[in-house]
Image (tube, helix red, strand yellow):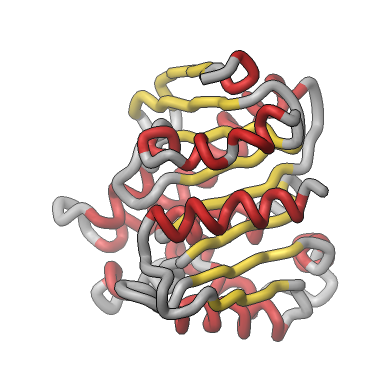
Amino acid sequence: MADNIAKVSSRWTSSRLHSEILCVRYGHAGAPVLLFPTAGGDAEECERFLMIRVLTPLIEAGRIKVFSCDSVAGRTWISSEHSSAYKARMQNVFNDFLTEELLPAVRNDCGGEVEMISAGASIGAYNALVALCRNPQHFRAAVCMSGTYDLGRWMKGEHTSDLHVVSPLHFVPYLGEDSRQLALLRQRLVLLPTGEGRWEAPDESWKVANVLGARGIPNRVDLWGEHYDHDWVTWREMLPKYLADLTA
């Protein structure tokens, strides 16, 4: 890697998640981008699957700094060892980790208060959406690629209080009209690009768009066509385009 993309790694034991977490930063300046891994991924997944390589022009130009952390909650969702209630609870705790541990570390790295861009694919897209919808004071946009947003498949019919607050499909419709959270969300942007090829589910993105749109939250579904599969090849083409637009 070039000097301006030199990887900086931080590892600490989270008092909230009760596990060791790796966070990685790529870049030296620019808009901070929090890139969430796929369900089973770790902080370095984006490097192994060549996402950092395709983002190199933006990183070298000082337009973005990319941060990534282990997918602790994502791994829990796809695990067969835990109950549905536990999975939703861990997602809720992961948000506490995000706001109380990870975001302060990002702000410290960036030298003060910053508005971030969240991004991710598949379950990472879900996490990018949740990050913005729950914390619009910290994020100005989300790039949610080929997302999986309806967690019902893992909940086995349960609807817990934790699920409600970690699922934008559930909590956004009930945000108070006079709430600061909704007011801020109406100043944000959610991008929902998705392929229409193998393993893709465009209906998931339309569900989110309909919920956000009903509350006046700016969003856009971009259909990339049947030649784009639910795969890193697709996401490597998508993400540089959207981040270039958001940092123009």
> Can you give x and y, in whole percent of width and height, for residue 3 in the image?
60, 14
Examine the rendered structure and indicate whether residue 47 appears above or below residue 219: above
In the picture as drawn, the residue positioned furthest to the left comes out as 81
Residue 90 appears anywhere in the view? no
Q: Residue at 31% across / 72% down in the picture?
A: 199
Q: Judge by depth and name the residue closer to the eye, 166 or 125.
A: 125
Q: Residue at 57% across / 29% down in the picture?
A: 101
Q: Judge by depth and name the residue closer to the eye, 216 or 93.
A: 216
Examine the rendered structure and indicate whether residue 72 appears above or below residue 184: above
- Quarter of the rendering containing residue 168: bottom right
> Can you give x and y, in whole percent of width and height, for residue 11 in the image?
44, 18
Count the labels in the image: 0
Question: Is residue 216 toward the left or the right of residue 92 in the image?
Answer: right
- Quarter of the rendering containing residue 201: bottom left
Question: Is residue 142 toward the left or the right of residue 31 in the image?
Answer: left
Question: Is residue 198 toward the left or the right of residue 137 in the image?
Answer: left
> Can you give x and y, in whole percent of width and height, for residue 139 in the image?
72, 49
Question: Is residue 44 toward the left or the right of residue 246 in the image?
Answer: left
In the picture as drawn, the residue positioned furthest to the top comes out as 3
Q: Residue at 38% across / 41% down in the picture?
A: 49
Examine the rendered structure and indicate whether residue 224 appears above or below residue 26: below
Residue 39 appears anywhere in the view? yes
- Quarter of the rendering containing residue 152: bottom left
Examine the rendered structure and indicate whether residue 136 appears above or below residue 31: below
Q: Judge by depth and name the residue closer to the eye, 11 or 232.
A: 232
